[in-house]
Amino acid sequence: MKYQTNLLKDFPNNFLWGASTSAFQVEGAAKEDGKGITVADLRSQKSKYLDTSISVDHYHHLVEDIKLMADLGLKSYRFSISWARIFPHGNDDKPNKKGVAFYNRLINLLIENKIEPIVTIFHFDLPQALVEQYNGWTNRKCVDDYYNYAKTLFELYGDRVNYWLTINEQSLLANVPTMNGIKASNPENLRQLSEQSNYYMFLAQAKVYRLCHQLLPKAKIGPAVSYMTTLPYDHTSLDILKSKQLEDMIGFIDMDVALRGELPSYYQRYLRDNQITLNVELQDQEDFIKGRADFLGLNWYSTSIFKLNDQANPKMLKGIISGVEKVRDNRIMNSEWDFSCDPQGLRYALQRVNDRFPNIPIIITECGWPEKEELINGEVNDVNRIKYLNNHIYQLREAIKDGVNVISFNPWSFLDLISVNDGMDKRYGLVYVDRDNYDKKELKRYPKSSYYFYQKVINTNANNINKMI
């Protein structure tokens, strides 16, 4: 019998303590310096609140914001590059020089401050021109355009970027296809187009995993997966099975394809049962086999409890979450947006991933707490976020002690940023940005109490986290 003697007892000294954002939610400058319009820009314009034209103006506050990151002590920063800032139409002959220069400046400033860039290639902001040219991800042409875009990023920034994320929360895009600009005349056609786009996103990532390994042999690449841990409301086999199916189809499917190089059997049955036929070519199988991820990026916020209810009206397309409703657990802290604070759930979730993919490196790419907040005398005392961070970091250490290979923690978000549905009301940031839904004010930055709490976490390598609070 062999015993595992190399189990860690704490966070390693080279652990990447970071934070996260995405381009369309923080940059602003949606129409400046040659940037093209994206699906995310158009969706934000339909909001009754602010849109991406200014957002929190990270584009023009870059030096100030990175100084705040450096003062915080960040070891990593997970951000996204806007496809349309590099290629305004998604597939231009040459990249946009001013867009290239902006991200060069961003990456160089991070390197100068000893902050590891973790770059998301595509985060909800498909160039609208690709939707108008050929309906975006529903067409195989988008695979080639994404591949060329990723290749360009590798060539431009690969000498400084060691960690790449391919697509953020693909399962969400597949189940809310309007986020990819996909429309259809009826629900059946929309589901068909959605699943075809899902397949093409899987294929594009496989091709880009392989390309990254060829061009940047020292770099690591993986997906950013929406990992929703689902628990059954009733302790029956029927509810437990439904919870497992939800978890498979929303979270594990993206992991399975990225690491195993094939469409899982549960997904193939789903396609068959719903009479969905995918456009598959012979070459695709080789691309999947030879294109595998090196690590998993996990966007994990909370556990979700579901009960069977045929009358429920899910936000996603029917077929995945139909027949269930989400149930609030009032025994634990819940946000106004029904996010639960369930830190033990993070440890449980990480154990499940490690059981499925033993010792796979894991980057927590998102994990955060939303609040409505008010600036009082230049301060924001966000005690609930501190509790959330403290307890999740405590359980993250426990997961590492369990043998889970977590290498980085990047809570959402570094700055307050725009939520398309909730504007500036739904704040996640460690840094408060003084603007509201209607008035940009001076966009002044104020570190919150959680900023200083997390600063101590980083400075002590979480030695200040010694109990749940």
Image (cartoon, grey):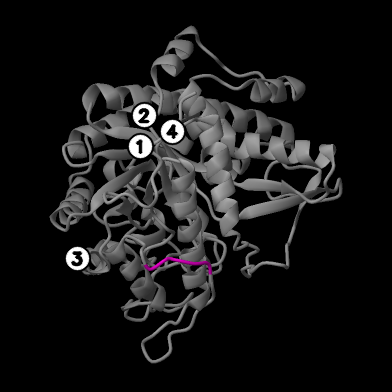
The span picked out in magenta is 464-468
In front: mark 4 or mark 1?
Answer: 4
Give the foreground label among 3 and 1: 3
User: Which residue is denoted by mark 3 in the rendering?
Assistant: 63
Identify the disc placed on residue 26: none
Question: What residue sits right under mark 4 in the picture?
Answer: 4
Q: Is residue 71 above or below residue 22?
A: below
Residue farthest along the top direction in this orientation? 282
Q: Which residue is mark 1?
A: 90
Callout 2 secondary element = helix
If you read the primary sequence from the N terminus, does the residue marked by circle 4 or circle 1 appear first? 4
Disc with the residue nearer the chain's start (3 vs 1): 3
Q: Residues within 10 Å of mark 3 (few under 14, many from 20)?
A: some
Q: Between disc 2 and disc 3, whose residue precedes?
A: 3
Callout 2 amino acid:
Asp
Residue 357 coordinates in the image, percent (x, y): 50, 30
Amino acid on which the number 1 mark rests in the picture: Gly
Q: Residues within 10 Å of mark 4 (few under 14, many from 20)?
A: few
Could you tell me residue 417's position as x and y percent?
42, 65
Q: What percent of the width, then of the height, locates residue 283?
A: 44, 9
Rendered residue at 30%/40% (across/down): 163
Describe the element under mark 1 as helix, strand or loop: loop
Q: Which mark is residue 145?
A: 2
Mark 2 vs 4, N-terminal side: 4
Q: Is residue 325 visible?
A: yes
Give the CA distance from mark 3 to mark 1: 28 Å
Q: CA distance from mark 4 to mark 1?
A: 49 Å
* Residue occupying the point 45% across, 47% down: 401
Name the amino acid type tagged 4: Gln
